Amino acid sequence: MAARRALHSADDLHLLHDARAGDREAFERLIQPQLDSLYRFAARELDAHQRLGDLGPGEVEPADLVNDAVLLAMLHLNHMPEGATLRGWLRHLVLKQVDREVRRGRRERGLQPPSGEGETPDGRPFWAYFLPAYASSDEPPPPPPLEAEATEAASLADEYERIVHLLPGLERRVFTLVAIERVPLGEVARIFGQGPDEIRRLYRGAREHLRQLLFGERTRVR
């Protein structure tokens, strides 16, 4: 955990310096350790949007998103926000690419936001597993209780991710980075070029929209 919280190791800082100076090998060494987890992150995002009907199966591949994000990172490495980690910034780039593809896909299909997508199957209040942490804290939510059955926990996680993808785009990206990917709020603020108070406002707005989706209006927010 301590290693994850550190912004960069000394070796990474040297590689980052060389990569920004145009050293392609340094960039490859810097990016290589990120690729497997970034691919899994992209695959999870695409799967959620396919289940929502935003994208068709195979319409966009995780590798496409990862390749685009890596290319953007290479071209704009000198503009990576000061204090941001490569891990957090790459996920931000993937989320932006996902949003672009979703807008394109829905525009090409002439789709409107479907009704009732905020409802949980059988009215199951899975949010009870997460809600206490959100009621009075800005901390990311805890995982489902350890005593929960494995199949139940997997079902809750799937539904959790589905509901998150009903949020408006900017709130969804902030919430995904902070609550799911555990990128510190201050780092997210630097990635977005916003003050911490604005990112906190978006984060809290996402929490409130999630509660509305589950317990209130139950309509797609975006």
Image (tube, rainbow, N blue to C red):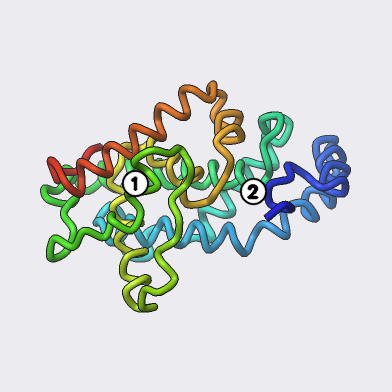
Mark 2 surroundings: few (<14), some (14-19) or many (≥20) residues within 10 A: some
Relative horizontal placement of residue 217, taking residue 29 as reference (left or right) = left
Identity of the residue drawn at 12% across and 41% down: 217
Q: Earlier in the sequence, mark 2 or mark 1?
A: 2
Q: Secondary structure at mark 2?
A: helix
Report x, y in % for residue 57. 33, 65
What residue is shown with label 1? 102
Residue 93 figure quarter = top right
Identity of the residue drawn at 19% across and 50% down: 118
Total labels: the figure holds 2
Identity of the residue drawn at 72% across and 60% down: 33
Mark 1 surroundings: few (<14), some (14-19) or many (≥20) residues within 10 A: some
Identity of the residue drawn at 38% across and 65% down: 58
Q: CA distance from mark 2 to mark 1?
A: 23 Å
Q: Quadrant of the N terminus?
A: bottom right
In this rendering, the answer to whether 150 lies above or below 165 is below
Report x, y in % for residue 38. 58, 57
Residue 82 figure quarter = top right
At label 2, the amino acid type is Arg
User: Looking at the rendered structure, which numbered label has been put on residue 87?
Assistant: 2
Q: Nearer the viewer, residue 118 or 18?
A: 118
At label 1, the amino acid type is Val
Q: Do the numbered discs 2 and 1 sit on residues whose CB atoms are within 8 Å?
A: no
Relative horizontal placement of residue 107, taking residue 219 as reference (left or right) = right
Q: Quadrant of the C terminus?
A: top left
User: Looking at the rendered structure, which numbered label has been put on residue 131?
Assistant: none
Q: Nearer the viewer, residue 211 or 14?
A: 211
Relative horizontal placement of residue 74, taking residue 143 as reference (left or right) = right
